[in-house]
Amino acid sequence: MSILVNKSTRVVVQGITGKEGSFHATQCKAYGTQVVAGVTPGKAGQAVEGIPVFNTVRDAVKTTQCDTSLIFVPPAFASDAILEAADAGVRLIVCITEGIPVNDMVRVKRALRGRDVRLIGPNCPGIITADECKIGIMPGFIHKKGRVGVISRSGTLTYEAVNQLTTLGLGETTCIGIGGDPIIGTGYVDLLAMFEKDPETEAVVMIGEIGGDAEEKAAAFIKQHIRKPVIGFIAGITAPPGRRMGHAGAIITGGKGTAAEKMAALEDAGVIVVRNPAEIGKTVQGALSPRGSV
Amino acid sequence: MNIHEFQAKQLFAQFGIPVPIGKEIRTPRAAEKWAAKLNASVYVVKAQIHAGGRGKAGGVKLTKNCAEVPALAKELLGRNLVTHQTGPKGRKVRRLLVEEGAGIARELYLSLLVDRDSGWPVFIASTEGGMEIEEVAAKAPEKVLKEPVDPAVGYQGYNGRNLAYGLGLPALEPSILGSFIALLGNLYRLFMEKNASLVEINPLVITHDKKLIALDGKVSLDDNALFKHPDFQAMRDLHEEDPLEIEATNNNLNYVKLDGNIGCMVNGAGLAMATMDVIKLAGSEPANFLDVGGGATKETVAAGFRILLKDRNVKGIFINIFGGIVRCERIAHGVIEAAKEVDIRIPVVVRLQGTNADEGRKLLQESGLKIEVATDLWEAAQKIVALTGKRRKKADAAS
């Protein structure tokens, strides 16, 4: 088992004929993902590595029954692409695009409310179920099927954590990059609830960073609803206030959103908070071993 | 992107939000001319820097005498203003806003930003104008009102009424109700049309003659939306930015200068922050945040090196790359070329992990350069801290 995506997930890549889109569609397919369609307006009839290209997501859905979209469209057109996928009946949308205007995402998030569709991202590495299905830009080879679920606002920092889990032989179930923007489709809470229900996930690694209060909200939820061990890391204890640290969402404003506050909230909820990012894997191992030895 | 108060007020005026009559001034001579033309009962001379707390720091001067305006301008121009937001070094004042003063009967607070959790724009208002809203929120949270606006339909009259009655405005000044509700609508339009990430009026004043005026104004524009507004480029003030940060931006690098002495270069924002944190855990302080991005090339690595070395506080460099799409051997080539080009005399530790990491490490080890190579993040951090620490001790002993 896993969450959200698996072997039977059928993927359409929006922006498939672009440099990023074609490269990553090929990589995802090579990993074993069923990449069944691509979309670039005006390029219907072409193919990318054997993947048929359509003009619209609607056409792609009709012909290939794809149920998940992976978006590589430039920022100015990304909100249009997300809404197009939602309207065409796709159930999961993974948007990799970085740099979408916040007010565009305000409208997109409002339009998706109450609909039977989930958005992951934007500004994220995507989602992967180890050894089954990779929908995103993460390096597939560092993942290995195993016991730990990963949720993260970051990209390469997630790879760092995953690599530690794999090296220690713990492996992963599903890893999701939720995105570094202030407004994202899916937050920690929904995913924590899914991991709690997933029988193969034995522990969850949650990687946060400065800015906003998503980690605090997650902490409140964990306290109430999560029984499985959660291991947390928050990046940016050394980040100064008022400065945007790369990600649009990583900024301490009005004294709020500091790493220290987030760590305290998580610890209060029973999360094992790791101070040293090099020790994420070891800490998970420690949290799992008492059960493993029984 | 932040803009000056006078620029924010120009935007306010464009959107029908009342502001005092004023002008941007760069010389005492221009101040003299403008003051004569303005012919006000009170003149306000305000330093224009991208930082709050100007009033307390002496950056705002008032006079009733038109003839004093040039002297006040002279006093402020070129002065280094230190506020609680500028840091100890302060900011040099190069521009002023000279405007007419208002007869203040009442000060309110008003701002608009996007609530990250709901994804809706939300107005924040308070009767405690002129104070910092964080302070009000800490001391008297009941005095901070919030009004979310449904982005599907935009600002509605009821949003304005909720705030107006919540603030008790009709009791304070019934004649102001209509113009307050209209002002909020104009502010919402500005926020959405100009892709602002924050609009703040503090204080929004009610004058003795019962008018609303935005006495101060702060507008931050969404960096991601600058492509929609090419005219904003003219509002950018490079003096308000760190020269190294400007150079980084021009090279498509994400750089923030800090005060420590270990320069770091990392791919990915989250890992870059984590690398800074690990430097501190190992006993030193990071000199910067530097994200070379997902598409790091030889050129970006070389540009990153040059920027790190221009910071005189930097006593050691820590490069941390997790190769995903970026291949480590390419980064290694970039490091080697850059190192040959710029003559590095301080310790460098390169930690490579992920795609082609072994190959990358081998290249570096065989390059003949004095570069320490590492695999493990913690080991690498301890190494660079130890190397810079040793150097410092040696330098101390020599002096």
Image (cartoon, coloured by chain):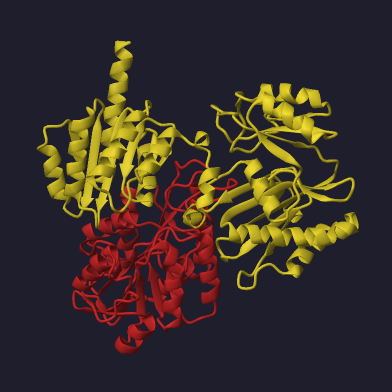
Chain colours: A red, B yellow
Visible residue check, residue B301: yes
Q: Residue furthest top?
A: B399
Image coordinates for residue A265, horizontal then vertical, percent: 52, 55
Q: Residue furthest left?
A: B366
Visible residue check, residue B375: no
Front in this rendered view, residue B85 or B388: B85
Front in this rendered view, residue A198 or B69: B69
- Horizontal side of B332 relative to B159 (left or right) equals left
Image coordinates for residue B9, horizontal then vertical, percent: 68, 46
Quadrant in the picture for residue B315: top left
Is B368 rendered above or below residue A126? Answer: above
Image coordinates for residue B23, horizontal then vertical, percent: 69, 38
Is A166 rendered above or below residue B384? Answer: below
Quadrant in the picture for residue B104: top right
Image coordinates for residue A95, horizontal then vertical, percent: 39, 68
Is A114 rendered above or below residue B310? Answer: below
- Horizontal side of B32 relative to A119 (left or right) equals right
Front in this rendered view, residue B318 or B235: B235
